[in-house]
């Protein structure tokens, strides 16, 4: 299972990027940017399940990642992968970080997002 702490640790160890907290009053929302271009490649947020159309109560950590539009539609399963939350729905996906999506599936998507947002 991959949770918020695992995502942060993986990104910091793999890419050397620190989480950037955009709002002082919100310590659950952060983004990861390329150090040179400052483009986002990952965003970590906490949202109510219901905001994702799920009939569950409570708050869930989510990970927004850039994704190839040809691939993103096939990933949306309505259980653990959704169109990007507060992002371009064609180019971004949202993954639940509550154990619904396996870590072995999340890691390559983080890497893909990093590559897609890297300067060409």
Image (cartoon, rainbow, N blue to C red):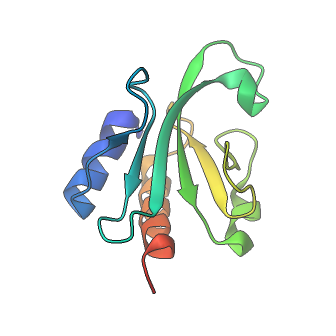
Task: Please report the residue visible at 43 percent of the width from the left and 75 percent of the height from the top.
Answer: 118
Task: Please report the residue visible at 64 percent of the width from the left and 41 percent of the height from the top.
Answer: 80
Please tell me which residue lies in front, 23 or 62: 23
Task: Please report the residue visible at 37 percent of the width from the left and 26 percent of the height from the top.
Answer: 24
**Horizontal and vertical percent position of residue 99:** 50, 34
Please tell me which residue lies in front, 54 or 23: 23
Please, is residue 55 above or below residue 85 in the view? above
**Horizontal and vertical percent position of residue 37:** 38, 70
Q: Quadrant of the C terminus?
A: bottom left
Task: Please report the residue visible at 73 percent of the width from the left and 74 percent of the height from the top.
Answer: 70
Residue 71 vs residue 55: left or right?
left
Count of numbered circles on the image? 0
Q: Residue furthest top?
A: 57
Q: Residue furthest bottom?
A: 120
Residue 58 vs residue 5: left or right?
right
Q: Quadrant of the N terminus?
A: top left
Q: Residue 55 occupies which quadrant of the picture? A: top right
Please tell me which residue lies in front, 120 or 78: 120
Q: Residue furthest front?
A: 24
Q: Residue 110 occupies which quadrant of the picture? A: bottom left
**Horizontal and vertical percent position of residue 10:** 28, 51
């Amino acid at each position: 299972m991959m949770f918020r702490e695992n995502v942060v640790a993986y990104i910091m160890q793999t890419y050397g990027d620190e989480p950037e907290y955009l709002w002082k009053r919100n310590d659950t929302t952060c983004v990861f940017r390329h150090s040179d271009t400052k483009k986002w490649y990952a965003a970590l947020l906490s949202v109510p399940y219901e905001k994702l159309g799920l009939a569950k109560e409570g708050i869930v950590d989510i990970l927004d990642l850039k994704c190839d539009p040809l691939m993103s539609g096939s990933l949306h399963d309505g259980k653990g992968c959704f169109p990007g939350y507060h992002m371009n729905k064609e180019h971004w996906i949202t993954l639940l970080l509550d154990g619904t999506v396996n870590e072995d599936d999340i890691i390559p998507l983080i890497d893909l997002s990093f590559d897609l947002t890297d300067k060409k």
